[in-house]
Amino acid sequence: MISIAEIFKLHKMEKKNIEYPYCFPYKPYQVQVDLMDKIYDLLKTDKKIGLFESPTGTGKTMSLICSTLTWYAGKQPLPEAKSVQPRIEDDFLSLFGNPTESNTSPVKSRVNQLFKKRAYSQIKSTDIREIQLNLKKKREQREILQRQQAATKSEEDSHLLTYDSDNENKQKKLKEIAIRTQTLNKRAQASGVESSAKEVQIIFCTRTHSQMSQIVNEIKRTQFSAEVSVVPIVSRKGLCVHENMKDIPYVSLLNERCQDLCEKSKCPYNDHDLTEIMANYILEKPQDIEEIGQYAKDTKICGYFSSRKAAQEADVLITPYQSILSESTREALGISLNNKVVVFDEGHNIMETISSMNSVSVTLPQLSNSIRAIILYTEKYGSRMAPKNLKSLRDISDVIDKLQSYIQKHKFETETDQLQTLDVMDVLIQADLYKLDFQKISSFFDKSDLIRKINGFCTAMIQKEKQNLVQGKKQSDASNIISNSRSVLYAVKEFIRILQYKPEDGKLIIEKQNDIMALRYLCLNPTQTLKRMLDQVKGLIFISGTLEPSQEFNLLINKAKEGEVSRFNCAHIIPKQHFQGLIVSQFEDHQFDFRFQSRLNESQLKVLGNLILHICQNTPQEGGVIVFLQSYGFKNTFLNFLRKTEFLKFLGSSRRIFEESQDGVDIFPEYQKAITEAKAPSILFCVIGGKLSEGINFSDNLARTVIVCGLPFANSQSIEIKEKMHYYNQIGDANFTGNDYYENLCMKTLNQAIGRAIRHIGDFATIVLVDQRFSNLRIKRKLPKWMQESLVEIGAKNSRDEVQGLMTQFFKYFQK
């Protein structure tokens, strides 16, 4: 734990002179300053949308952190403005603040509060064990009381719905009154320290836990680590310390078990006093998930509820995409978007992520299991339920029954084609569901905790049936139906959630697979999720190595007012002579065409093998060669062809061959070891859109040459692609048609693969694009801008000599 002396030392850091713009921890490159200027300007001028591109290797994450936190802390961007910053007293007692002082920035407003938290954490942490023993005694006393009460109350009553919407409204009003009263009191006291601290937060959203840790570690390198509180938000699975929860495989089931324990006050690790201690520890200094998790294990305190508590007072939240994009998840975590700055790192993924989240389905067996579970539950508790709860339950039963009936009656046009798209409104009318308030029903699911109640009831029933089976009693048919599906209503809940949105923003797909009928929702307009967020937040920032092609953002930009959008494309930090881009449309008199109908031509496969060998011979031996192919199927076909012709054996005599696997085996560490430790000339065959094409660092000798074979276009005949292309053609935006969507889907994946090679200012690489379509101006314009400027097209004649000459000249520069 941090000592009081260290607290004082951290506090004194405020007086340290800032050497570089935006409190950057080292001298920034001009491209970094340019990017920080644009981000800072967006926040300072209250613009709503920022689209920023910063190529890999340009210090994107650090630039993002320093610019946003400089604005948040109320600092001046340039070092010479340091002298005008508000003075903080050196006296230790002044850390606890003067309530009459006015503070203008969130960090200045909460700096005293933060140090009080740190001091409180230091004092309390030494008494954790004593507190735990005291709480244990309290729990034992509470359990005795509960056992006494249980004599007159059945255990089955715990599954009864107790949700009271009238009482909820009363409580909500009382809470609003309390907040207003508290605000007036604070104004009267001329304080405002805590309230202003919670008005603004920075929320960084990432795709993976490793990216969350990267942001935390970057913040640690800055002076902001002593000034702001940082809280990473993850699921229960990541921070639960209960020994009985470790082996639960499903997140939904873990959530249910956790809620059950907490509701009955039987979790020894989730207690207000204990989580308050750990919340202060989390707020004390920036820490990643592993550090918080380890502290939770060491102290036997729930890290999940502690982090949720800490999040209410944090300056910076770091979350996975799902936690912010899902309204129900935000509500469960207690995260409000009002006046928040939300940053989506790797923002090129945002539209596909939203589409994937909202593409939900429900099968006939799931509907059947759900309706029977509700019937059994209603038979047990219906007479004791509040009338409003019973009505809501009947509404849900009505939805399930009508969906089930609709699917059962559906007839496909042919026996072979068991797939059909439907308009959402047509289905709602035909199923007689168009009058229902799906938003109200969806809200009831969350607020009443219905799923957990019914699943708890089902689980208890299953346990009872097992006992009957042991005693030789017959098992009921009803129990057989529900025993195979504990989370019986999750699919129904998600499907009802999606039906509350505009019918024109999606399509329904009815399909039959393995004799199971299903109804699936296809999200056509992911922008609507962002538009709902835009109405609440202070600003939305999307940043990535490349957002290109970025036309999908047009629908969101159209929602903003004129002047509320900021766009910036950061130049690359590497010198132009550190990158070489080659387009090879033809080699050895063969024109490359990797479209589906011609990609498996054996003559083409042979020429491609010769080109790869030729490129390997002109790449330094110590430098790795990465070959990106269009799909796992094509990769397997190509390598099998090379094996059959013994070409692969010949290639293997000069370079060690590695191949990405589709079965989850990670080949990258082995390839990395061969290059960096064994110093063995190597080549790695992988797939565009596979695990190695995004998020992997092929810096320095791991990738001196990258070969991209073909364009990874999706199957244009798939029903999902057809419907999305049709949707974008129908909305009438001349700047973003269905064909643009189809091309962009391909080029985003391709651009991420291209960006794997050059990772820092001293890096260098050749990227070879193999396909005649790369010569198309339309395709070229959708490549990263930093790459477009340095592309060279290899001529049809003397292509072998031209490739050799350019590569030799390029790598010779670095041999000097």
Image: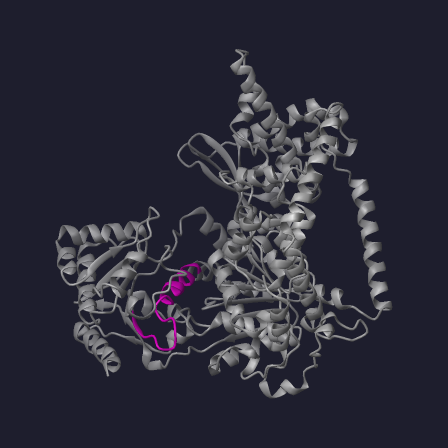
Magenta stretch: includes residue 724: no
Quarter of the figure with residue 67: bottom right
- Percent coordinates x, y for residue 237 in the rendering: 53, 46
| Residue 683 shows in this picture | yes
Residue 563, by quadrant, is bottom right
Total numbered badges shown on the rendered structure: 0
Most foreground residue, 109 or 60: 109
Coordinates of residue 15 in the picture (x, y in percent)? 63, 81
Q: Identify whether 527 is placed above or below 262.
A: below
Q: Is residue 792 above or below residue 377?
A: below
In-front residue for pair 555/682: 682
Colour scheme of the rendered structure: one colour
Q: Quadrant of the N terminus?
A: bottom right
Q: Residue at x 68, y 43 (%)?
A: 135
* Residue 764 among those drawn in magenta: yes
Nearest the camera: 561 or 463?
Answer: 463
Q: Which residues are magenta?
A: 745-767
**Residue furthest top in the image:** 472
Q: Is residue 729 visible?
A: no
Q: Which x, y percent locates residue 126?
A: 63, 56
- Residue drawn at (60%, 59%) of the image: 282
Q: Is residue 769 left or right of residue 209?
A: left
> In which quadrant is the C terminus drawn?
bottom left
What percent of the width, then of the height, locates residue 600? Answer: 24, 53
